Image (spheres, rainbow, N blue to C red):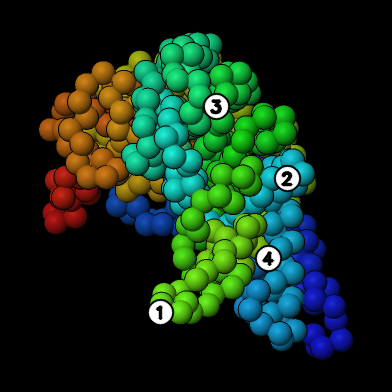
Amino acid sequence: MSVSTLSPLSAVPDADADADADADAPSGCAPLPVLGRDVTVPLVTGGEVTYAALDYAASAPALQRVWDDVAAYAPYYGSVHRGAGHLSQLSTELFENARRTVAGFLDCREQDQVVFTRSTTDSLNLLAAALPDDCRVFVFETEHHAALLPWRGARVTLLDAPGSPQQAVRTLEHALAARDPHGPALVCVTGASNVTGELWPVRELAAAAHAHGARIVLDAAQLAPHRAVSLRELDVDWVAFSGHKLYAPFGTGVLAGRADWLRRAEPYLAGGGASRRVARRADGGVDVQWHDGAARHEAGSPNVIGAHAVASACKALGEAGFGALAAHEERLIRTVRDGLADVPEVRFLSLFGDGAPRVGVLSFVVDGWNSSHFAEALSAEYGIGVRDGLFCAHPLLRVLLGGDPQDQGECGAPGTAPGETSLHAVRVSFGAGTPDEHVERFVRAVRELVRGGARWSYREADGRRVPDTSA
Ligand SMILES: Cc1ncc(COP(=O)(O)O)c(C=O)c1O
């Protein structure tokens, strides 16, 4: 294809046709095809099986559509906001179009700004760096470390883990009512827990924050892949999410919302792209005028592939419809809960109670099992990928497990002795690309392991149980 005669965006082929063709791929009844659905992995007991990726909450596989869109654009790749050539113009337009697509996906308000970052962690650190002086931050102890830790330069009020959504609202209201009402305040809250999958009452928490003159940022890392997120409807001031959890693993995240604090803050990164004018002062120093818009916090060459991938995922999820995606997940959650209802050794973790609405994320402990042993056995003997540990939410795990989980390392490696019940947990998570068979295999595997034990022997290595292949 010659690009010389084409206007910038029409040069990028539309990958939709490929995506439609892939809808017939052997993915069971998964609503959206993802990469890796035919990958096979060896079993320690012999043979191979199709890999069951059940760790979407950590990183979801790329949507086929995202991959196709990235591949279609790749030959036209060029610099963004810093080139006169045709492909630079095309790439700049693609990048800014991605920003508009994300704004639409999040139902942003007229004045909201979409800043491309690297991840949710990056987005929340950016907001933390933009807090006004004397800002007080309110955050529940149940948050992921990415939402718990960035505010350490501010005055932080840590809120107790609530036992219900209503109690979460009451706890926040109580804390906000006790603060000095004159200074700025920010509430940071998750939309869906990365440990229990439970949905938090975001709209009510936002109303409570605003009623007390505070602002609120929504950590939508686990919510955005599963439910529609509307800044307008939820009335949150900012929302943060990660592309790699939204089926777009190309290194881009998003912070979207109010522009004022961001405009007043020093640029998150200082450098080209963030600066409008730079001049040498008479005294030898450097004068800088920074941009006001999103570019202020996007110094350096933007990750146009990442932004394009996120926009592609936003479109794909929007077209599939969150109603259909949630119904699919709901069915998979029921498969897990019903399939393990008569296995009392498996205890699911919950703050709000077993029946609380949740996304496709479930954590559990298995009586008598070390969590790393259990997760390794699922992988080695059944080809199932889950996560075990503390899930970067140490204080929450302490609440849920009622003990000190003997933290080892940033995200918690398991450390219990053989035969003891683990003070870490196992997490299974799924989404738009998960076929029923993967979850059915998981249920069967858990039942077999609990009833019959592991078929292989495992040894300790670096604090984990790993299959012993020395015999
Ligand atoms: C609820 C929640 N918030 C924030 C994060 C951090 O996301 P990232 O690692 O993409 O920055 C995660 C990641 O697991 C998460 O689950």
Judging depth in this view, the residue of 30 and 441 nearest the camera is: 30
Q: Tell me whether the residue at label 4 lies in contact with that at label 2, contact meaning CB atoms closer than 8 angstroms.
A: no
x and y percentages locating residue 277 in the rendered image: 59, 73
Q: Tell me whether the residue at label 3 lies in contact with that at label 4, contact meaning CB atoms closer than 8 angstroms.
A: no
Q: Which residue is label 2 attached to?
A: 111
**In the shown orientation, is residue 324 left or right of residue 133?**
right
Circle on res. 190: none
Residue 137, relative to residue 434: is it above or below? above
Q: Residues within 10 Å of mark 1 (few under 14, many from 20)?
A: few
Mark 4 or mark 1, which is nearer the start of the sequence? 4
Mark 4 or mark 3, which is nearer the start of the sequence? 4
Picture residue at 22% right of the left edge, 49% below the top: 467
Circle on res. 284: 1
Specify whether residue 4 is in view.
yes
Mark 3–mark 2 Cα distance, whole angstroms, equals 19 Å
Q: Tell me whether the residue at label 1 lies in contact with that at label 4, contact meaning CB atoms closer than 8 angstroms.
A: no
Specify the amino acid type for callout 1. Answer: Gly
Picture residue at 61% right of the left edge, 70% below the top: 276
Picture residue at 41% right of the left edge, 46% below the top: 385
